[in-house]
Image (tube, rainbow, N blue to C red):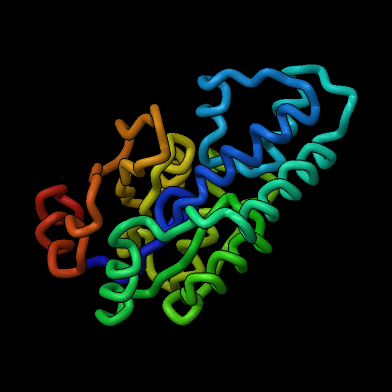
Amino acid sequence: MIKAVIFDMDGVIVDTEPLHHKAYRLMFKDVNIDVSDSLYESFTGQSTYNICNRLCEHFKLPLCPQTLVDIKRDHFNFLFENDKDLKLIEGVLELIKDYHQNGMTLVLASSASMPNIDKIFKRFDLDAYFKTKMSGADLKASKPHPEIFINAAKATGYKNSRCLVIEDSTNGIKAAKAADLFCVGFKSPNSKNQDYSEADLVIDNFNTIRSENLRKLFNNASVH
């Protein structure tokens, strides 16, 4: 049976994607680049630095990636403080409380920077439910590399077979599977055109994976 759940943040816990989208588009305008929707969608699940590094290479910009990171984060920080649309994903707080009350160990594994993770957790009072939080921005490799999920699984204190990952992006799902973890692909409202084919289970409603349903779901998926 599942003993630990590893959550992605953007698109799974909090609906920050509209704010990130606005911040990136403002940064693109600042550095005068035209980023297509398909190129932007391919970035989902990656760290800001890796995205900016790809942009510098793709557009042959005479700027270092960190400059783009700083511009984007300035825009995001302003939006975070002033945009009233920021909210938790529907049903996720109830899911987190359900898991916590049933003795499950919760770990966050996000590509977001730790300052942004801390801001979200403080704003929505989430720290009490999680054992630890991990930022992919602190690692050498970004999703789809499995490093963050390998580390997160170790942090739970349980074997991989007792851990579940909830992800909303192609890159996140690939990372979870490369780390040899059962992955639930969540069709988040703002994660468009993502590939869920490698996920072990695909959902669009968190009620599907409430604690009382997990045993049946895993038996059906032949996970032991």
Where 160 sits versus 157, above or below?
A: above
Where 188 sits versus 8, above or below?
A: above
User: Where residue 98 sits in the image (x, y, percent)?
Assistant: 26, 74
Residue at x-position 39% and y-position 44%:
168
Query: Viewer-proximal residue, 27 or 66?
Result: 27
Q: In which quarter of the image is residue 62?
A: top right
Q: Quadrant of the N terminus?
A: bottom left
Residue at x-position 57% and y-position 38%:
21
**Residue 48 appears in view:** yes
Where 148 sits versus 37, above or below?
A: below
User: Where residue 110 sits in the image (x, y, percent)?
Assistant: 54, 54
Q: In which quarter of the image is residue 92?
A: bottom left
User: Where residue 193 sits in the image (x, y, percent)?
Assistant: 39, 27
User: Where residue 45 sits in the image (x, y, percent)?
Assistant: 52, 41
Q: In this view, does 97 lie to the left or right of 118?
A: left
Q: In this view, does 73 lie to the left or right of 193?
A: right
Query: Viewer-proximal residue, 197 or 119?
Result: 119
